[in-house]
Image: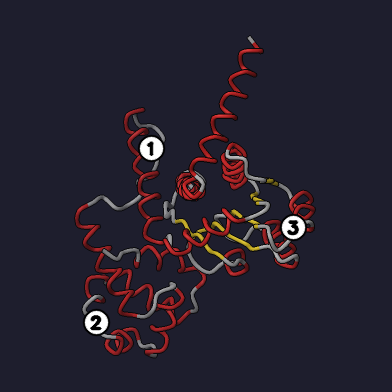
Amino acid sequence: MLKGGLISIQECMPSLKPSERKVAEYILTNPGEVVNLSVQKLAKRTQVSEATIIRLSRALSYKGFQELKLRIAGDLAQFNNNNHSYQEIPTNGSIASLIGTISHNNIQSINDTLSVLSPEQVETAVDVLSKARKIAIYGIGASAVIAQDFKQKLTRVNRWCEAAFDFDTQGTISANLTGADVAFGISYSGRTKDVIESLKIAKEKGAKTISLTKFGSNPVADLTDINLFTSSLEQSIRSGAMSSRISQLNVIDVLYIGMTSRKYDESIDALERTRKAVQVSKQMDR
């Protein structure tokens, strides 16, 4: 079942033009009504042109208004069967309630990401990463944790990979990339200046570029060849970097398993070699 229409609208809201935002707000307020409206009727009710509604659908990466309606209908069916809202993190509740809330929000973030993550883009990313001579991974702040996780995974399966967490290092790596390499930029906001500049240098050198950002148009995603999107719509500033991190790590796991499955026997051999090397090191420390 297609879904993700309402989530996509919420994620893209800040980047929409005023007329598009007017339609988006109407859809979010009246989703059950909109799934039964034609483009003409929705245009009349929102007092915009039909072209505006088509542009909104395309801004959400959909083929047209019909696909948007189908995805909204899928959302409504899912919402009727699940608690689909993020929960505010309790500040003075029990540990049991804290466990439940954090776990619920993390699960919700992954489920929302499934609605906006394109299988076609994931497959293309896995293919490009699998063939790369060198993989450069960039992340600043909280995104650096995601970049380091991916580097550790790729290193264990004997892939040439470098991770950098500041512009000086990122820029230096990018300057030495070639058309046989991949630069992977991670930024939930999609607006991290250092990552943007590093990816620009990588593109100038001919490297293929991949981004992992929140859903919608943003400077990082607009710059790269392959866009991988996540979603995390929790409102509390206290939980802002938590659920989004979980959804990003989930995408990294998908890419990693996708890559290792392409060369399964080689990957298993490499994992066994690194396991034994680490095990020997631990024994020597005793």
| Residue type at tag 3 | Leu
Q: Disc 2 marks which residue?
A: 37
Per the image, the residue denoted by label 3 is: 177
Pick out the residue farthest to the top.
Answer: 286
The numbered mark, 3 or 1, whose residue comes first in the sequence reads: 1
Position in image of residue 282 (x %, y %): 61, 17
Residue 127 seen in this snapshot:
yes
Compare residues 118 and 68 and report the one nearer the observer: 118
Q: How many C-alpha atoms fall within 10 Å of the one at disc 2: few (<14), some, or many (≥20)?
A: some
Asked whether, in this view, residue 124 is left or right of residue 45, the answer is right
Amino acid type at circle 2 is Leu
Q: CA distance from mark 3 to mark 1?
A: 47 Å
Q: Residue 263 in the image: state x and y as whole percent.
A: 51, 46
Mark 3 vs mark 1: in front: 3
Q: Looking at the picture, does residue 83 appear above or below residue 28?
A: above
Q: Callout 1: helix, strand or loop?
A: loop
Between label 2 and label 3, give the one nearer the viewer: 3
Residue occupying the point 30% across, 69% down: 71
Kind of residue indicated by mark 1: Pro
Q: Give the camera-side residue of 42 and 144.
A: 144
